Amino acid sequence: MNDDPVIRTVGLCKRYGGKLAIDHLDLEIARGSIHAIVGANGAGKSTLFRILLGFLPASSGEAFILGRDCRSLTPADRERIGFVNEEHTLPGWMSVDAVTAMQRRQYRHWNQDAFDETIGHYNVIGTQKVSQLSRGERAGFNLALTLAQQPELLVFDEPTLGLDVVAKRAFLETLLYSNATRNCTVVYCSHQMEEIERVADNLIIMERGALRNMSPPDDFRSRVAHWVADIPFRGPDLRLVPGLLEAQRLDGLYHYLVLDQGEAFADFLHACGARDIHHLPVSLDRAVNGFLAKHHATPRAA
Amino acid sequence: MRDLLKAEWQRYRTWVLLYALAHLLVLAFFMRIADLGQQPLNVRRLFGAGYLVTGLLLGLHQMGTWRRPNQWLNLLHRPVAPRRIALALFAAGGLALLVAVVLPLFLAVAWQAFGSARIVDLRHVLLPIGAEWVALCAYFVGVYGMLADRHYSASALVLLLWIVLARASGPAALAVQAVATAIAFAMAMVAFRPDLGAPPRSVLATCLVAVPLQVAVYTLILVAGFVVEMGWIMLGTHPGNMPVPPAGGVTEIVRLSPRDRMLAGLKDATSPEAPLWREQVALSEVRTLERAVAPTTHRQDMSNGSPMAFDDSDARIQWTFSHDRMRYEGTSVVTGLHVGELGVGANDAPFPAVATPAPNLGHPEKSDTIIVAGNTLYRYIASTKRIVPRLALPAGEHLLTTSAIGGSVAVLGDRALYFYDSRHLLNGDMPAPRQRLAIPGHNGDLGTIEVVELVDGYLISFAFTAQAHDMRGASPFQSVWRVDDQGHTTLVATRTLMADYPPVYRYRAWWPSPAIHALREASVGLFATDDPQDDNDTPPIPSSVRTLAFMLMGASFLVGLWLASRRTMSVRTRLAWAFVCGIVGVPAVACLWLMLPAAEPEPGPRTEPAHA
């Protein structure tokens, strides 16, 4: 196994009319472990995947997946890349057995044990039509098909979207505890922070088509702090609050969510007249949401 | 690939079988009430349109469901080359059409051949193949329409237009349909790629997309011209629609009664006998010979341009011409059984050309029938059930129409007008013509012929107006001739007619793009047999129209160069596009604009959010 990144983009741009969906993206995703990509709607995640899989031409820049130029992927390259999308698009008119048999014949490294292990978590009967499966069962079937392909790189694009809590948990646990994922790199894109928190070794945050963060989730969470200050008079001008992501006044107390501010922030609050100061830990969900909400478009009156 | 084919077939199987059953029932119904093998062109067109729409809808539906982003990704992101996936899906589509369209047709032909006394020729066996080509071509057009860039994906429709307009008939028509299908298939293969809508990369792929697109733009220009013409008609100044047509023009001469048309032709006659002829025309019956509207029927033509059967009402037999046997096959109207074969003469020899019944020439026996085949006119004698030749034009000439005029029969060939004594004709003497008058122009330009019987011959007016509204036709004129009883011919008067329509209208198919016009003419005539009725004396293109075309080509070159400079391409490619724009004209400019998006502006430096 080489150390080349599984995904590499250099100055990648994709323009839709006047809008940049991918904005000079320089990204390197190392081989191994689970990488989560998060971002608000329109951050460019799906566009990035489509470019990486050769389904959308880039406006400029370069993109490589498993060391291959995305514009010239061969069938053999595609065999090494598993992809699961949120719709779990499978031929609804075919039976589970027929789809499985077709996939088995197409993928040279098909692992029947991995398939059986994964599909065993779901109440799926081989003679059932795919269209008769529940959304959760279809997701599980799709996961089983993808894992059985033994890909080097597994890309999940919001795979649990629309699943209920039980199906979501079943999907994640199947993914996490499957032997089939041991030797592959997983790129997991989701809006569900609790999922990211459970599965991700590396957190990639995209915003407006650009890379904003790449670090382990705990490292990112430690960059965001929640400070609560009791300031008897007016709080500081928000424009002067360093690293401010979010500010609120609740029950007479000032709440500040700030990025990359150490203990020096307490000195800033004291200087602003704070009498009592508390420093609270934040969840990954809160940290990411605050980070992304900072530049989210809001109505002018808000 | 086999798995995908099987999967896709499974997807449509139920619907295809239901369609095939419904198709078979429709055919069975129509076969009960008519002989589907002997239908005219319009019936064939109706069925063809049904198969065309079937193929088109299948292609649109099949690819419409696959082309949604996630479906497309799921379909193509697998260890199978896109072209193999395409072949599998197309094979499934082809198989569906084979079962839904071809199989019921073959069953219908088989029933005709083995379950009835109706004629089944090679042309009938070829019909299902033609239906498959039409449906398959439409299917690929639908595939392309769904997968190609939406700015030009409808351009493949020109291939269907080509099939409709192609002049080739019989097996040659199948060849044209096969070529159109092959092109549509290649276009569908070019469009079938992961990055849908991206411009083609290779030169061949570019040509496969660009040429139909340019023809489509050219067609749209013609349609726009038609819309302008509608406006012209609404204004009330269109020559063909004016209450009083322009004096001395084609429209006026066409609208005149045969008598007035003859008199108009004599207006400038300077012969001393002219006043007498005018008086005679005013008092005599003026007979009109019109060119046949239907094209000449060729052997194994898929449809009947003219009726292929006639009835012997006394013997209760319907005689139907067999293209395979080149003889008539008889079917009893009473029992529906085969009652024999009818050829030429006592030994029932095959006809030298496809035979069609002709108008009655006043023969005494009501069940007798006049038949025309090639250059020969035959008579079916009901009493003896024999077909005997009655007159023959010189070899190589086509007999187009006949008309009884007094005691004579006027016979129009594609080179001359002949007069025969009808008594000799009925007696079976194979007479020589009493008079022959060479057509003073080209047959394809001939509008009407008026004949007035004089005391010592005939006065004949030829109006060459058939294609006067079009660039193919000769400059319109009227020519009046006199033929005397000794066969001497004299030009009485020639009158030049106004074309009514300005050159910019008559040459509307040429000046927008002479290159595509040439391509159109070549493709429409591909594999077609020359039709003697299409022989025109096409005049040279006027210099004003040439100047207009060259100006458009020059402007197209400059606009093409400018458009190419705004697109991401090499200097060589840029020059090639400009050159093509210069040669092809406006359609190529539109093609360049639609096919290749303008280069996107270089993205500016990224704007970093404050917190990053």
Image (cartoon, coloured by chain):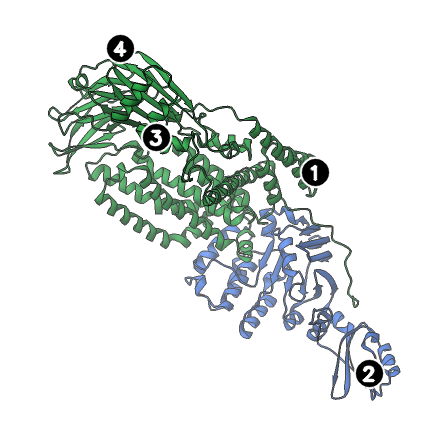
Chain colours: A blue, B green
Q: Mark 4 highlights which residue? A: B486
Residue B238 in view, yes or no: yes
Which quarter of the picture shows residue B165?
top left
Whichever of labels 3 and 1 marks the residue nearer the N terminus, that label is: 3
The relative height of residue B303 versus residue A271 in the rendered view (above or below) is above
Q: Position of residue B243 (x, y in %)?
A: 40, 40
Mark 1 vs 2: CB contact within 8 A: no
Q: Give how far apart the Cα atoms at labels 2 and 3 are.
A: 95 Å
User: Which chain is indicated by disc 4?
Assistant: B
Do the residues at pointers 2 and 3 share their chain? no
- The amino acid marked with disc number 4 is Gln
Q: Chain of mark 2?
A: A
**Dot 4, crowdedness within 10 Å: few (<14), some or many (≥20)?**
few
Tell me the mark number nearer the camera, choosing from 3 and 4. 4
In whole angstroms, how far apart are the C-alphas of marks 3 and 1?
Answer: 50 Å
Of pointers 3 and 4, the one earlier in the residue sequence: 3
Secondary element type, mark 3:
loop
Q: Is residue B427 above or below residue A105?
A: above
The kind of residue tagged 3 is Pro
Q: Which mark is residue A235?
A: 2
Residue beneath label 1, please?
B570
Q: Chain of mark 1?
A: B
Local packing at callout 1 (Cα closer than 10 Å; few below 14, some 14-19, many 20+) is few
Residues at marks 3 and 4, CA–CA distance in whole angstroms: 34 Å
